Amino acid sequence: MAKVAAIQLKSDGDPSSNLAVAAHFIGEAARAGAKLAVLPEHFVYYNVRDTQAVAEAEANQGLARQFFAEHASKHELWLVGGTLPLFNDQTAASRDNDKPHATSLLYDACGREVAAYEKIHLFDVNVQKTGKRYCESDSYAHGTRPVIAQTPCGCVGMSVCYDLRFPELYRQLTEQGAEVLVVPSAFTAATGQAHWQLLLRARAVENLSYVVGANLCNRDHSKKPTWGGSAIIDPWGEVLAEMDDEEGFIIADIDLARVQELRQNMPVLTHRRLA
């Protein structure tokens, strides 16, 4: 048994302010016993336009990466740092024609950066309910590789936001050993209301895995409202903890024995006939 937390934030355009709020809730989650905490997508540099400049600034222990390392070590917990714009080659001097990846970093309890997942599926859609157009590929490059990591809370499969609509990614993560699926997100208010928790629960049930969804909140934002609704789901699809539209954190127990018991009793992962 181990406790995991999802931290929900309402970010603005000030990275230092966003990190200060995150620091508070990381500390609160750690004091509540969390051994793994997940932060939302984009929360540090929310609505940043020049992703290349941020990627350059973060290439060598920039503001956010230093923060993640320090707070993981300070609180002795594993930390999923939402996402940052980062380049593959972090030593290149000039990348004028390159786009960074939306990269989710995992830090261990000593503050070491132990895994980096580059978001595979980019949010290029028209949200019909609001008429808004989103095009992440204008600013980011597609990732190509699923990423898992061994942690004290089990084998973690990494994903980000729009990935949630692509079950084949989660099946690959599960086949590679994932028991806990983490989903830092910035789900829009319109799509989040319709599908956010539904998709979290579906990915949990399909893969008999825990799912930890940490979302940005602010349903009343004038330009880019986000849904919130962060949730932790168990392998049977039950909601162990959830939030509405406020900042804060939720925490729940991960029971890896339950994962193995369910997978043995209902071996859907070995019953597949189509790949």
Image (cartoon, rainbow, N blue to C red):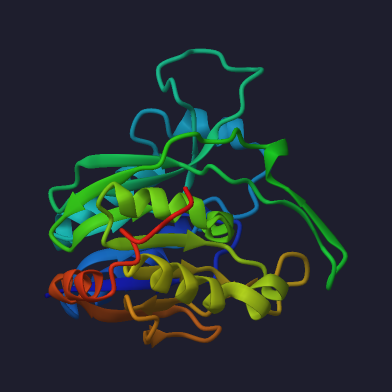
Q: Is residue 60 left or right of residue 140?
A: left
**Furthest residue in direction top, as rendered:** 93
Residue at point 41% right, 59% down? 19
Q: Is residue 128 above or below residue 252?
A: above
Q: Which of 274/229 is in front?
A: 274
Q: Is residue 133 left or right of residue 77?
A: right
**Res. 79 image quadrant:** bottom left
Residue at point 60% right, 33% down? 141
Q: Is residue 177 left or right of residue 59?
A: left
Q: Is residue 18 above or below residue 45?
A: below
Q: Is residue 159 above or below residue 26?
A: above
Residue 192, x across and y down, in percent: 63, 74
**Furthest residue in direction right, as rendered:** 131
Residue 104, x across and y down, in percent: 41, 47
Quadrant including the N terminus: bottom left
Q: Which of 124/165 is in front?
A: 165
Residue 169, x across and y down, in percent: 47, 50
**Res. 256 image quadrant:** bottom left
Count of numbered tags: 0
Residue 139, x across and y down, in percent: 67, 37
Residue at point 61% right, 28% down? 99
Residue at point 62% right, 36% down? 140
Q: Is residue 156 above or below residue 244?
A: above
Q: Which of 82/117 is in front?
A: 117
Report if residue 71 is visible in the image: yes
**Furthest residue in direction front, as rendered:** 273
Q: Is residue 275 left or right of residue 222?
A: left
